[in-house]
Image: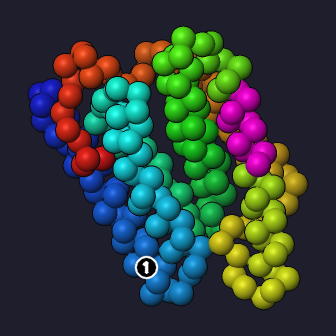
Amino acid sequence: MTGDTRQSWIRTVARGARYAIAAVFVTGIRRRNPGAVVNAAVSYLATFLPSLVGRYYGVEFRPWQRAYLNTGLLAHAVGMLGPYDDVWWWDHVTHVYSATLLGGLIHLSARHRNRDPTPRVLAGVLGAGALWELVEYAIHGASRRVGLEPLLVSYGRTDTLLDLLFDLVGALLVLAVGDRLVPASRRDGDQGSEDAG
């Protein structure tokens, strides 16, 4: 497979993941599943983040980075249709995905400001993970009190600790490989306009 063919295939994966998120949105509406609808809508909008972040930092995300983002968002959206409840490892994978995405953004920001990314990535990912768990718990509890289906589900203390553990795994992965995987500077000539991913 040539480099151009591989890049084209990766762009197709990124686009396909975006379309699949839209399909999750439609499926959520048909199943009257507000959690799937809201999560798919947010995930779909988030697929456009590389363009916004790239403009702000003056970098161009590589096709594989866009595909990684989109497939992570797809995994989260699909999870709301049942895998979070039915597949024991699904939540762990999506927490690693989310942690690497957030950690990667924090890493990029720290490098852009010539600062050490290590404490920022760890604090940012674990802080955001803890805040997410609190929000999840609050939304779940409030929804049950008023008799609505929750947009987010809390599965108890053990699940919360596992979520934070997998958030830490994601943060450590970013710190292990982050400098080798940062997006290319626009000055480096890798400027393909890619809203595809």
In the rendered image, which quarter is residue 157 located in?
Answer: bottom right
Say which residue appears at 12% left-offset and 31% top-offset.
4
Say which residue appears at 72% left-offset and 44% top-offset.
129
Answer whether residue 124 is magenta in the image. yes
Q: Which residue is mark 1?
A: 27
The percent coordinates of residue 40 (x first, y second) are 48, 66
The answer to which of 46 and 18 lies nearer the viewer is: 46
- Label total for image: 1
Give neighbour class at mark 1: few <14, some 14-19, many 20+ (Cα, 10 Å): some
The percent coordinates of residue 141 (x first, y second) are 83, 72
124 versus 78 height, above or below: above
What colour scheme does the image use? rainbow
Q: Is residue 100 visible?
A: no
The percent coordinates of residue 117 (x first, y second) are 61, 18
Which stretch did the figure color magenta? 122-131
Q: Amino acid at mark 1?
A: Thr
Say which residue appears at 43% left-offset and 16% top-offset.
180
Left or right of residue 174, residue 184 in this image: left
In the rendered image, which quarter is residue 176 located in?
Answer: top right
The answer to which of 72 and 137 lies nearer the viewer is: 137
